[in-house]
């Protein structure tokens, strides 16, 4: 008598929902708006029989951001990572990365007293963090919660009290000391903290202020992505852009961001995802820590952005492919180029070569076969030539990886100022004039 093969429940596919690093947010700096110790310091009495006195304000210097909402996000505690749809006033379309892409222009207007930024510059810092959490496939369609803590920042100086970060118009009074404002600079969103600091001559402590921002993203147009792919591989052979376009159009419709919040997904694992023939379908709910609207499009199983670059093995996705569609597409192109290189053999047509690359790009087995067939039947896939590839074609040149962007290295400590010392002890005792 045959022993029945035990079936499992849908929960079998979820190893854990822990997401250990889900709340590793940025630490908010300490505000120090003035050098004031007390509201007033008594100097002396003008009439020892009376109560009136001469007084001097203790604060000589001040620094305060006036152009941004300085309120904390609702429910925020220092060091936490805000995920709610609600934020402060520093969010919305005007704080979204553009489709080009480029960072949003951020107006920073500071109220300063007792000093001139032309003589003692305002040092600024923009920190961006995104704690991205999804379910990674560890083996045999069993998933566990995994996070990546993504960080990018910029630092610089301004010699004016009013300046605009990432303004495309050149400003000689504004410097970028770490990271840049060039058209090809990295872009990054998420929870951001903009900090300003200064140490005017004669001030005994560093003045600081900050504001929370939420920076989202804007999808490129399909033409933007196609033009980038053409610039990247079009000169190698006319078939190469079609091979790449077909793959990315199928993966995500060439979208990098979702315009709605991403909270959970349901997927039914069919017989193709099971090894036991009698196993019934498993409807599985994948529930992860929320990403608000206009954050990167990430599938439940860690497929990221336009190319659905997927977290497998020890792979680190990183901030670039997550937030910069150009880097996402470049990374996906390189993965596809490697698959094409590995599959090549003589006497293939361009279509056969592309089909093999598409198959290996998506894994192996029946699911990869179906994927490659679907991509081959798409409008872009049908534009790939059916001619034989030339004998002796330089496949290594055709599939050479696109270069990585430069590595900036870790950011320096901020602010680049050393305080002159602690506040002096106030002298409040009465003394004869």
Image: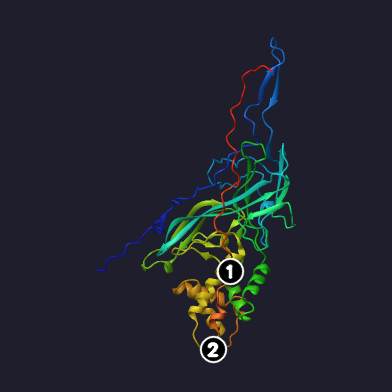
Q: Residue pushed farthest front?
A: 433
Numbered disc total: 2
Given residues 400 and 412, the one toward you in this image is: 412
Q: Which residue is mark 1?
A: 330
SS state under label 1: helix
Provide residue 74's location: percent of width, then percent of height: 59, 41
Q: Is residue 9 left or right of residue 130?
A: left
Q: Is residue 164 left or right of residue 302?
A: right
Provide residue 348's location: percent of width, then percent of height: 52, 86
- Quadrant location of the N terminus in the rendered image: bottom left
Query: Is disc 2 surrounded by few (<14), some (14 to 19) or many (20+) residues within 10 Å?
Result: few
Where 396 falls versus 91 (above or below)? Answer: below
Where 340 falls versus 419 (above or below)? Answer: below
Q: Which residue is mark 2?
A: 392
Mark 1–mark 2 distance (CA, rounded to whole Å) = 27 Å
SS state under label 2: loop
Given residues 178 and 263, the one toward you in this image is: 178
Give yes or no for contact between labels 1 and 2 (Cβ–Cβ under 8 Å). no
Q: Is residue 255 visible?
A: no
Provide residue 61's location: percent of width, then percent of height: 68, 35
- Going from the N terminus, do you reach mark 1 or mark 2 first? 1
Q: Is residue 397 visible?
A: yes
Residue 337, located in which quarter of the rendered image? bottom right
Where 138 falls versus 75 (above or below)? Answer: below
Given residues 253 and 398, the one toward you in this image is: 398
């Amino acid at each position: 008598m045959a022993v029945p093969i035990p079936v499992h429940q849908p929960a079998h596919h979820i190893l854990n929902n822990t997401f250990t690093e889900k709340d590793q947010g940025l630490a908010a700096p300490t505000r120090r708006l003035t050098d004031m110790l007390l509201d007033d310091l008594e100097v002396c009495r003008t009439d020892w029989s009376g109560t009136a006195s001469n007084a001097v304000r203790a604060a000589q210097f001040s620094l305060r951001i006036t152009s941004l909402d300085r309120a904390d996000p609702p429910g925020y505690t220092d060091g936490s990572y805000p995920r709610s749809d609600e934020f402060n006033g520093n969010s919305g379309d005007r704080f979204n990365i553009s489709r080009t892409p480029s960072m949003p222009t951020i107006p920073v207007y500071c109220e300063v007293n007792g000093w001139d930024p032309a003589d003692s510059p305002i040092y600024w810092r923009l920190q961006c963090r995104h704690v991205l959490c999804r379910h990674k496939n560890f083996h045999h369609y069993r998933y566990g919660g995994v996070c990546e803590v993504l960080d990018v920042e910029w630092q610089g100086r301004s010699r004016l009290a009013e300046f605009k970060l990432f303004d495309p118009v050149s400003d000689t009074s504004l410097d970028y000391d770490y990271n840049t404002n060039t058209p090809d600079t990295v872009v990054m969103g998420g929870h951001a903290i903009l900090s300003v600091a200064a140490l005017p001559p004669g001030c005994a402590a560093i003045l600081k202020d900050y504001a929370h921002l939420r920076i989202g993203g804007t999808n490129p147009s399909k033409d933007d992505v196609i033009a980038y792919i053409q610039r990247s591989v079009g000169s190698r052979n006319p078939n190469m852009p079609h091979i790449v376009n077909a793959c990315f159009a199928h993966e995500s419709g060439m979208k990098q961001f979702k315009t709605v919040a991403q909270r959970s997904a349901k997927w039914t694992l069919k017989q193709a995802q099971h090894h036991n023939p009698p196993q019934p379908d498993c409807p599985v709910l994948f529930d992860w820590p929320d990403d608000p609207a206009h954050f990167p499009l990430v599938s439940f199983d860690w497929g990221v952005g336009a190319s659905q670059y997927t977290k497998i093995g020890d792979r680190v996705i990183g901030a670039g492919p997550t937030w910069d569609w150009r880097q996402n597409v470049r990374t996906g192109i390189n993965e596809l180029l490697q698959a094409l290189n590995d599959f090549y053999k003589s006497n293939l047509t361009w279509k056969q070569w592309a089909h093999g690359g598409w198959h290996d790009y998506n894994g192996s087995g029946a699911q990869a076969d179906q994927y490659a067939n679907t991509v081959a039947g798409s409008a872009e896939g049908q534009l790939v030539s059916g001619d034989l590839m030339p004998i002796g074609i330089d496949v290594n040149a055709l599939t050479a990886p696109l270069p990585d962007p430069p590595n900036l290295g870790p950011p320096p400590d901020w602010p680049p100022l050393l305080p002159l010392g602690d506040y002096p002890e106030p002298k409040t005792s009465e003394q004869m004039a």
